[in-house]
Image (cartoon, rainbow, N blue to C red):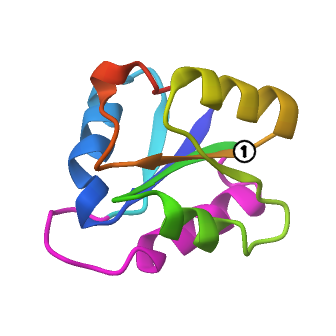
Amino acid sequence: MKLAIASDHAGYALKEALKFAFPEHEWVDFGTHSEASMDYPDTGAPAAQAVAKGICAKGILICGSGIGMSITANKFRGIRAGLCFTPEMAELSRRHNDTNILVLPGRFVSVETGLAM
């Protein structure tokens, strides 16, 4: 299964940690590729479009608070992006809201929280 993943500079470290922690997934990385300051829609929009078009089955978007990426992703028809802080929120978001993009707040969660897919 192809999974889209993208972040802004504040989510870069978490994005890279997720890819490393889950090598069994086929990641399509839409960037960013460093911690240099950048605008979240530049990476979030192409990732959301890939999910909306069926190029990727699901996606993970990460920015500092998660709010910007949520707003960006949910502008696309067919996208149901959910901002989650806990594993329980992620599970409920998928089960009850049929989300296809998990949005993580890079400044508030880490791989160690167990929130990743």
Q: Residue drawn 21% across and 46% down? A: 13
Residue 5 point in image, percent of width and height: 46, 50
* Position above or below: 115 against 83: above
| Residue 4 image position (x, y, % from top left) | 53, 50
Q: Is residue 38 left or right of residue 69?
A: left
| Number of callouts | 1
Residue 93: give x, y in percent of width and height.
Answer: 73, 35
Question: Would residue 12 appear left or right of 109 to someone viewing this image?
Answer: left
Q: Residue 81 in magenta?
A: no
Q: Give the range drawn in magenta.
A: 32-56
Q: Is 11 or 49 nearer to us in this picture?
A: 11
Q: Which residue is drawn at 48% across and 78% down?
A: 41
Quadrant for the N terminus, please: top right
Characterize the local packing of mark 1: few (<14), some (14-19) or many (20 or more) Cα atoms within 10 angstroms: many
Residue receiving disc 1:
100
> In the shown orientation, is residue 31 left or right of residue 82?
left
Residue 55 higher or lower than 89, as above or below: below
Q: Is residue 52 magenta?
A: yes
What residue appears at the point 25 percent right and 34 percent down from the top-left corner? 17
**93 is higher (above) or lower (below) than 42:** above
Q: Where is residue 14 in the image (x, y as percent from the top left)?
A: 28, 42
The amino acid marked with disc number 1 is Asn
Secondary structure beneath label 1: loop
Residues 22 and 104: in front is: 104
Residue 21 sits in quarter: top left
The image quadrant that residue 23 belongs to is top left
